[in-house]
Amino acid sequence: RAAREAHAAAAAKAEERQKKIVAQQLASAEAELARKRKREQTASERDSDKARRLSEQLQRVEEMRAAKEAAKEDIEAAKRRIEEKRSAARAEKDKLKSDAEDLAETRRAYVLEREALETEKKNLETMR
């Protein structure tokens, strides 16, 4: 009977030891699982931040592209206005040149007319 009690006590002690070991293993496994979850959460947050930064960067690139396109259109419009002004200036210059040539022709005709009148006047005076 004493042997049986000693055996039962030893078995109870061994079972208690086994329970402690299992409890430690369980605590260790839970701690490892918590660390793993924390790592995954950190990685997820890092990926989320990276995705947000990339999205913001893409947005900035799109805005810059749109601004560049708008600037290009403004430049083209300015070039067209400049060319229109140049064309108008060339037309005005050609008109002024033509007017100057007409005026020079009129002056030459006037000079010839005056010379003819002077000659006629002299002839009349000579005849008197």
Image: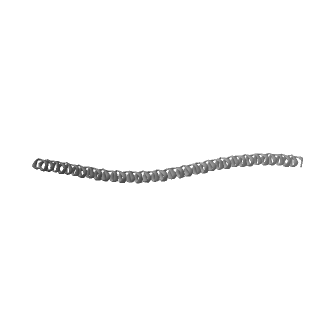
Residue 107 image offset from top left, x and y in percent: 22, 49
Residue nearest the observer in this picture, 78 or 114: 114
Identify the residue at horizontal 46%, vertical 53% (top origin): 70
Residue nearest the observer in this picture, 20 or 27: 27
Residue 7 image offset from top left, x and y in percent: 84, 47
Colouring scheme applied when the structure was drawn: one colour
The residue at the far front in this view is: 128
Residue nearest the observer in this picture, 20 or 96: 96
Residue nearest the observer in this picture, 107 or 91: 107
The residue at the far right in this view is: 2
The residue at the far left in this view is: 127
Q: Give the total number of marks visible in the rendering.
A: 0
For residue 112, side relative to residue 20 (left or right)? left
Residue 34 image offset from top left, x and y in percent: 70, 48
For residue 19, side relative to residue 58 (left or right)? right
For residue 81, side relative to residue 23 (left or right)? left
Identify the residue at horizontal 48%, vertical 53% (top origin): 66
For residue 21, side relative to residue 71 (left or right)? right
Residue 100 image offset from top left, x and y in percent: 26, 49
